[in-house]
Image (tube, rainbow, N blue to C red):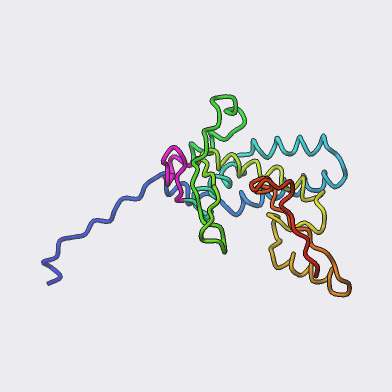
């Protein structure tokens, strides 16, 4: 029976895919983190000129651009979500081209494409929906690269009790901080819906709740 089976040919691997997978990702991430750490320390010292120079160095760095493209096309949860251009996945060959397109020398060529607007249900409120803008892959890669440059600068200056959208922090840290603040003395919580503040004709859609 084994002699009767037709020989199975192995599919030929894509050269661009092999090149992409063989990149020294650990080394590229360490190089990017090293520049981010220098930006963080310069921001702590208040050396704005050094911060701007290092940010330009990071945005032009090939390592940072490759890491940004990888996060957008492979690591992020919404990597299969298409923008207005309809692109859901980017093959390895186009990933190299995308990393080249987000170089600062290409910023002046064409404007940013609009985001695709979709409506998703609000958590805990199935009858209400909120808008969500989905950028294109190119815009997402540019945003990821910009985030790498801006995040260490402002992490050195943020308030210690700020927990929203910060690396290494989550909602449980905020809950713990609130618990420690209200444990021994009653406090007031100021809850304000800024986006829906003027929906119902009231000047301030706010509530004061005593704990």
User: Residue 84 appears in which quarter of the rendering?
Assistant: top left
* Outermost residue to the front: 201
Decide if residue 194 is on the left or right side of residue 130.
right
Name the residue at 56% across, 57% down.
122
Decide if residue 156 is on the left or right side of residue 16.
right
Q: Is residue 184 magenta?
A: no
Q: Is residue 89 magenta?
A: yes
Q: Nearer the viewer, residue 169 or 84?
A: 84
Magenta portion: prevailing SS class: loop
Name the residue at 45% across, 51% down.
80
**Where's the N terminus, which quadrant?**
bottom left
Q: Residue 62: where, in percent of width, then height? A: 60, 39
Q: Nearer the viewer, residue 166 or 27?
A: 166
Q: Residue 20: where, in percent of width, then height? A: 47, 47
Magenta-drawn segment: 80-95
Q: Residue 106: where, in percent of width, then height? A: 57, 28
**Where's the C terminus, which quadrant?**
bottom right
- Above or below residue 90? Residue 102 is above
- Above or below residue 169? Residue 92 is above
Name the residue at 57% across, 64% down.
124
Name the residue at 54% across, 39% down.
99
């Amino acid at each position: 029976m084994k002699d009767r089976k037709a020989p199975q040919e192995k599919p030929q691997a894509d050269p661009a895919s092999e090149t992409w997978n063989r990149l020294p990702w650990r080394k590229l991430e360490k190089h990017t983190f090293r520049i981010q750490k220098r930006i963080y320390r310069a921001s702590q010292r208040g050396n704005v000129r050094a911060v701007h120079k290092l940010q330009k160095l990071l945005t032009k760095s090939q390592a940072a651009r490759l890491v940004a493209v990888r996060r957008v096309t492979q690591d992020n949860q919404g990597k299969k979500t298409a923008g207005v251009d309809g692109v859901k996945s980017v093959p390895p060959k186009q990933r190299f081209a995308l990393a080249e397109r987000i170089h600062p020398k290409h910023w002046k060529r064409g404007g940013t494409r609009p985001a695709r607007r979709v409506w998703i249900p609000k958590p805990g409120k199935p009858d209400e929906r909120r808008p969500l803008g989905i950028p294109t892959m190119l815009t997402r890669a540019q945003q990821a690269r910009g985030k790498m440059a801006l995040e260490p600068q402002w992490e050195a200056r943020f308030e210690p009790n700020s927990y929203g959208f910060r690396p290494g922090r989550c909602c449980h840290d905020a809950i713990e901080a609130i618990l420690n603040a209200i444990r021994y003395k009653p406090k007031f919580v100021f809850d304000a819906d800024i986006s829906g503040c003027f929906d119902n004709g009231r000047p301030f859609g706010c509530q004061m709740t005593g704990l």
